[in-house]
Amino acid sequence: MKIPPRLRRALTRLTRDISFLALGAPLHLLMGLLVFTDLGLVWECVAGGDAGAPVLLGVSTVVTAVCVPALTVAQHWRFRRFLGLDIPRPGWRRPWRQLGYHFLSGALLGGLEALVAGLLAFGAAASLTPVWVYALPWQWRIEHLGLSTQAAYLCAAGLVALATVPALAAALVRLESHVGPSLLGRSREEDLARRVEDLTESRAGVVDAADAERRRIERDLHDGAQQRLVSLALNLGLAKATLVGLPPEAREVIETAHREAKEAIEELNNLVRGLHPAVLDELGLDAALSGLAARAPLPVRLRVDLPRRPAPTVEAVAYFVVSEALANIAKHAREATRSDVTVTLMGGILRVAITDDGLGGADPADGTGLTGLAQRVRSVDGTFRMSSPVGGPTMMSVELPCPAP
């Protein structure tokens, strides 16, 4: 006989709930018994009726204290085994949560679990009453004719009890699935703190992965497309120098192609430097910023004070901040004649300050790249500040955490 899938799922769920509650009842009632014993011994000590009560109270208190972590581990296993709830262990930073569960909630839940188990046992026994009656000798049944009617009533009561057990068991399991994790696990504040730590670690991993990907793209461009363009420019230069007998139109085509190849090489160099300059890895932030200042269209006064090299990710963020800021000054700073860049490392904080003498009025909402700069700085828990009043000057300040290794 094949059991319908819906009935099979219902039976599986009922078996799981009953097993969960049946295991929880002795665990909960054991702690209730210990607490009741401790309270009784305390009363004996106060009343002074038994001289050995203080010693027994001390022993009982030690047993109770030892049982609390053991019962917590057992409850964790019970939730994981039957309900699939992996409750994180809170340790002993807030022991009153576990004590409250075992002493108060645990005793109450243990009583409810025992009630459901007793109702199930009564229902199973009462529903089989007619079977037991008919198993008796027929002479005895004839002498007790009213017993059949009582057995029918008892069987009906047992069937009603069995019908209510699945709903009661499911409701009690839902109640325990809310109470148990909230008291036996970490608190909401601890979960939030752990979540923040996990997000910080994952974000750092994403930032490092993005930086590694930029480095890979830079290497591929430098070793692949850039080398091909250099070879093409050399061949066009040789053709222009050696093929002197060509018509003027052909020479003009070769010269144009040679010029465009050199311009493409220059643009590709700028793109590679924008992705991740090799000098940043080889010589550090000071040399990389010196190259930026030398290539800037406006005079740049650079001051770098780094007693040690920052972390590679922080170096990359600082470099791109200065690079984007100088590009914005060249494009958008009206009437700017110079800019100042100061980079200092003090107390585990890398400070980058960029100023220009333009007319100011910079607004991140105008699409000048300031929003992207702020996001890049926040990716490493840095702070971004900018002051650009109308009339100038414009001052940009970035602080990046850079703890000592």
Image: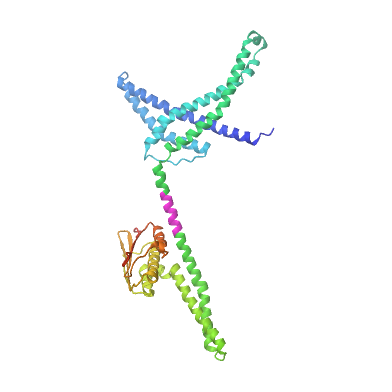
In the image, 109 versus 383, the foreground residue is: 383
In the image, 392 versus 80, the foreground residue is: 392
Vertical placement of residue 56 versus 185, above or below: above
Residue at the spot 36% in from the left edge and 65% down from the top edge: 362
Q: In this view, does 231 lie to the left or right of 343?
A: right
Which contiguous range is marked in magenta? 196-207
The main secondary structure of the magenta stretch is helix
Q: Which of the 4 image quarters holds residue 134?
A: top right
**Residue 204 lies in the magenta-colored region:** yes
- Residue at the extreme top: 143
Residue at the spot 54% in from the left edge and 24% down from the top edge: 119
Q: Position of residue 273 (x, y in %)?
A: 44, 70
**Residue 90 lies in the magenta-colored region:** no
Q: In which quarter of the image is the C terminus?
A: bottom left
Q: Where is residue 168 in the image (x, y as percent from the top left)?
A: 53, 29
Q: In this view, does 110 lie to the left or right of 329?
A: right
